[in-house]
Amino acid sequence: MHLHAQGAGSPKRVLKVSLGVTLAYIVLLVVAGIRAHSLALLSEAGHNLSDFLALLLSLVAVYLQSRPASATKTYGYHRAGVLAALVNAVSLVGVSFFIFYEAFRRLQHPQQVEAALMMGVAAAGVVMNGVIAVLLYRSGGDVNIRSALLHELGDTISTAAVIAGGWAIAATGDYWIDSVLSCAIGVLILWSGLGIVRETLNILLEGTPRGVQLELVETAIRSVEGVNEVHDLHCWSIGSETRALSCHISIADIPPSMSERILHDVKERLLHEFRISHTTIQFEHVQCEAAHGCVLPVGGEEHHHQHSP
């Protein structure tokens, strides 16, 4: 994925348009929520405010991720997007608990709600959030963009629920529905936020990438002709879309020209089966002893190969 693209469907352009539209809708939600006495609409305003911040952070992250690597930032700024996604997710969790608090208060003291205004504003929100979600889906798939996409998908569903709630209030006259609906929106926000928190923390803690099983990676490497043993195997994510791997591979005592074929086959298998593009592989032909990592005995020979994306 090339985040520096400036085409009509590039992340930067989509995020800028989404920011402007979301800000206008937040103002509409606040004004309509106050006039209609609807906590659900005000909850949606809070939800969309978190979306606005999410989109803003995502835009900043996209800019940072497009910056090249340097002598002090040798991997570049790939994790800027991951950090932005984590901040977005934590803000979602905070918003959800605020909604729960306000909904509890409103259940104790229900207020009359203008259902027609509530449904009209929510209908506009469904269209807006749906369009933004589609644009984000088409513009990229890293965790930063996906966190913003989850915000928008959650908004689309919750605003659709507000329409249903408004219809129920108009049909029954039960104003407590507004508070219950707000709680449901809060649960949705909390669920989506915690999911992103788990994924971003796994990346920041250099855990095994989502969807990758280390046992299968080891099996794939061992299956390459010429590989005798694999150890000191590590796999992690540099950014949400950049996977890295390092390991020691034992091979026969062969010339470097022959070991290049093994290295090529290992890298090809890792790339096509696991989308691991950045590899650091050390070849050994003597027994490796572990002492604060993996080191070779004195007098042993080794061939070190490093591949950068």
Image (cartoon, helix red, strand yellow):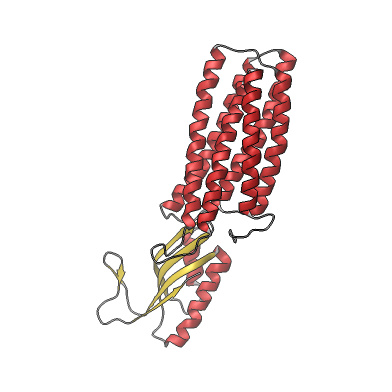
Residue most extreme to the left: 298
Measured along the vertical axis of the image, is residue 242 above or below residue 122?
A: below
Measured along the vertical axis of the image, is residue 203 above or below residue 177?
A: below
Question: Could you tell me which residue is drawn at 40 percent across and 52 percent down?
Answer: 205
Q: Residue 158: x percent and y percent?
A: 64, 32
Q: Quadrant of residue 236?
A: bottom left
In the picture, measured across the screen, residue 166 lies left or right of residue 282, that is right
Q: Can residue 153 be seen by looking at this rendering? A: no
Q: Residue 208: x percent and y percent?
A: 46, 56
Question: Could you tell me which residue is drawn at 43 percent across and 54 percent down?
Answer: 207
Measured along the vertical axis of the image, is residue 288 above or below residue 184?
A: below
In the picture, measured across the screen, residue 294 lies left or right of residue 230, that is left
Q: Residue 308: x percent and y percent?
A: 47, 71
Q: Residue 79: x percent and y percent?
A: 47, 55
Q: Can residue 278 be seen by looking at this rendering? A: yes
In the picture, measured across the screen, residue 300 lies left or right of residue 174, that is left
Q: Nearer the viewer, residue 13 or 127?
A: 13
On the rendered image, what quadrant is the N terminus found in? bottom right
Question: Could you tell me which residue is drawn at 52 percent across and 44 percent down?
Answer: 196
